[in-house]
Amino acid sequence: MIRKCLFPAAGYGTRFLPATKVMPKEMLPILDRPLIQYGVEEAMEAGIKNMAIVTGRGKRALEDHFDVNYELEHQIRGTSKASLLASIDKLIENCTFSYTRQIAMLGLGHAILTGEPLIGKEPFAVVLADDLCVGHPKGVLSQMVEIYERHQCSVVAVEEVPMTEVHKYGVIAGTPIDEDTLQVSQMIEKPTADQAPSNLAIIGRYILTPDIFDILEATKAGAGGEIQLTDALRTQAEQGKVIAYKFKGQRFDCGSPSGFVAATNHFYHLSRR
């Protein structure tokens, strides 16, 4: 049973400056709710109720969002606007939220390691909020929990990307198990097109086994001078302990302006149906 989900949320969001100068990028809204709320809703749909968030300086808005605002609720109580808080109220009532700070920005692997005190020695999910996923017929994490239950090892979500884009991702290669899953044999972080073993890119959804923390502790800085989660996962993959899953659904890269606009248009059109 996956009980906890870790949200690395300490990054600066420089591609959206100046909007993210004081606003966490995870709080940028897609229609009526911030990016991170979509991720928490996806985790709760997968049966996860313990949300662990790795924050940084200037990220207090994340904590305030997942908390009661007594003054606001008093002002709109009994009006038609009270129902607008229903989605966030549901999360606050059904989930617990814990926080820790990443003091230095040393990469995704370091952010995961920073979250170890919130997770402990159990398997856990990871959501990168700026990858907004719409799963079909169920959420991407719900799909991945089923894969984990079947294989009992780390699971990474992957999708095909153009070879001109592989330098932005961790890229995997492996042996097909069935139509949607592969036993990972190779992983490279941000390869050039001629280095990439395939065009299957890891996106911001993971289920990790707790030994990843010890591996990350021993992992040296890699691409960009940062501690890369992909490098730690490669160690697991060499032991046959990583499954890649071609998820059913659609991903919006909301860390980029074009992906953010595409997600906004998608959810706007859904709201008009």
Image (tube, rainbow, N blue to C red):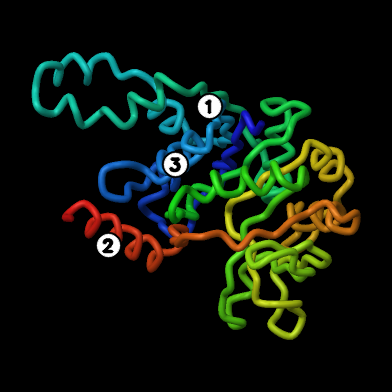
Label 3 sits on residue? 36
User: At label 2, which amino acid type do we have?
Assistant: Asn
Snapshot quadrant of residue 117: top right
How far is disc 2 from disc 3 in space, using C-alphas?
18 Å
Residue visible at 27% across and 14% down? 70
Nearer the observer, disc 1 or disc 3? 1
Question: In the displayed structure, would residue 199 be above or below residue 253?
Answer: below
Residue visible at 14% across and 21% down? 76
How far is disc 2 from disc 1 in space, using C-alphas?
29 Å
Residue visible at 9% across and 27% down? 80
Snapshot quadrant of residue 50: top right
- Dots 2, 3 in contact, CB < 8 A: no
Label 1 sits on residue? 49
Left or right of 196? Residue 30 is left
Q: Earlier in the sequence, mark 2 or mark 3?
A: 3
Q: Nearer the viewer, residue 235 or 273?
A: 273
- Dots 1, 3 in contact, CB < 8 A: no
Residue visible at 38% across and 29% down? 65
Snapshot quadrant of residue 195: bottom right
Q: Which mark is residue 88?
A: none
Q: Nearer the viewer, residue 211 or 153?
A: 153
The location of residue 18, given as percent across then percent down, is 38, 54
Q: Which mark is residue 265?
A: 2
Label 1 Cα crowd, 10 Å radius (few <14 / some 14-19 / many 20+) = many
Task: Give SS at disc 3.
Answer: helix
